[in-house]
Image (cartoon, grey):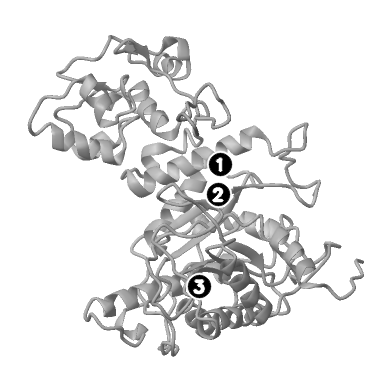
Amino acid sequence: MVVQEKLTLEDKLNILSAAAKFDVSCTTSGVDRGGNGKSLGNTVAAGICHAFAADGRCVSLLKVLMTNECIFECKYCINKSSNDIPRATFTPEEVAKLTMEFYRRNFIEGLFLSSGIYPTPQESMERMLAAIKLLRLKYGFRGYIHVKTIPGAEEATINEMGWFADRMSINLELPTGESLKALAPNKSRKTILPPMRFIQNGRKADENQYALTAEPVEFNPSAYEASRRFDKKLPESCEGGTAVSLKSYPKPRAAMKHFVPAGQSTQMIIGATPENDYQIMSVTEGLYQKFGLKRVFYSSFINVNHDPGLPDTADRNGHLSRTLLDREHRLYQADWLLRFYKFSVEDLLTPEKPDFNMLVDPKCDYALRHLELFPVEINRASYDMLLKVPGIGVKSALHIVQARRTCTLDFNDLKKIGVVLKRAVYFITCRDKMLYPVKMTEDNLLNYLIDEDKKPVIGGERLTYQQLNFFDLGMLKMPAGY
């Protein structure tokens, strides 16, 4: 057993910041709240965290646990109760002071706060709520705050937190209920999904009321019919998310105008259990459609406890395996297609072909699986069909639709618009002609997509690409005198 002396604030920060690093669901968006001249801090719509925001900026936040003490025995978690590791606990005042001092020094732009579960879920949630209320009410902090919801906490506490935090999230942990039962016996869908539904209903009630008046109104969940059941049953792995009846909780005094204004997110651990990509994306689609989540995050499994019963995901050098990282990347790409490109899981995967092709991105994989839909004539295709063409994004599809009203587009026009021709050229025609004839078979097109030597030539240069490296001086030409 680890015997500890009284810890300094710096000791606690070292322990509890390291303990929080495995939670990836902290990117932020959806909040635009400026300073008011009296309070401290502000936040913008792109969000604040140590991650890439929606507009491409890398932003920072203080990411810590309230405590790494935990009564649960989750096999994948470094903080599980049986682990003999240094333990620490912040007081609410310590969290508030740390956040303010880091902010004043311009080290951070906001706070991500989670916690181990000790001694009970309710008491853990109450300690986090106390810290957030100190920040908002005592110190006047108006910056971004993201808080983890503790499964098993009371609805009244979750409701009050929702009026002080910008975003709340509760981790689904694993894709299926069976996997959750095997690796996290203290958790279940019955304790994870109801808080998700509660937050969703609270946000809808707030939106419905705010739409009726320009002035802030008291929170009245009864204005929204929260007892309705799902129109369509979630995948089996999401069972347990039955409808939750909201009680009428008053809006706390001095709280923000809106309930969880940046929405909620969740996280799934990938690679610890044998679910295929089709199962994972089906659960993701269900969460977006039925719980209104802003984001689903995917975290590659790291066997931090060296459990022999769990997969060893490290390579020979002790780093996370490239295969698992590539899979995580493909899941994020597919997630993007679900949210912004009007794809469904059934478009991307089937029970017969349940996994993504690791050699190409999911959009190219979709095109290769549905060659009967291609090639697409750029000057006639609908906007929705253009979105399904590899190399054509949301903005470039919109530009194509606008430009072809006044002219007939060719391949050079598409390049100027921003279409990624190195992928799109195999799946489109301009004026009913392809750039050059290709055999429309899955194997042949796959070879073209992954073989750089076979890339076509347009405008005297070969269509190829590489990731920009800011340390490669050969790729950068600094201005004179820089």
Above or below for 345 versus 40:
above
Q: Nearer the viewer, residue 418 or 97?
A: 97
Give the amino acid at mark 1.
Glu
In this rendering, the label closer to the viewer, 1 or 3:
1
Q: Quadrant of residue 18?
A: bottom right
The disc at residue 214 is none
| Residue at screen point 78% across, 47% down | 309
| Residue at screen point 63% across, 81% down | 122
Query: Where does residue 305 sit, x and y in percent of width and height?
Result: 79, 52
Q: Quadrant of residue 454?
A: top left
Q: CA distance from mark 2 to mark 3?
A: 20 Å
In this rendering, the label closer to the viewer, 2 or 3:
2
Give the amino acid at mark 2.
Tyr
Mark before the other along the chain sequence, 1 or 3: 3
| Residue at screen point 66% across, 47% down | 301
Mark before the other along the chain sequence, 2 or 3: 3
Describe the element under mark 2 as helix, strand or loop.
strand
Residue at mark 2: 298
| Residue at screen point 68% across, 35% down | 321
Q: Nearer the viewer, residue 136 or 333?
A: 136
Q: CA distance from mark 2 to mark 1?
A: 6 Å
Farthest front residue?
481
Residue at mark 3: 195
Residue at mark 1: 328
Mark 2 touches mark 1? (CB < 8 Å): yes
Describe the element under mark 1 as helix, strand or loop.
helix
Estimate how packed mark 1 is, as few (under 14), some (14 to 19) or many (20 or more) residues with alpha carbons within 10 Å.
many
Which quarter of the rendered picture does the N terminus lie within?
bottom right
Query: Where does residue 331 sit, x and y in percent of width and height?
Result: 50, 42
Describe the element under mark 3 as helix, strand or loop.
helix
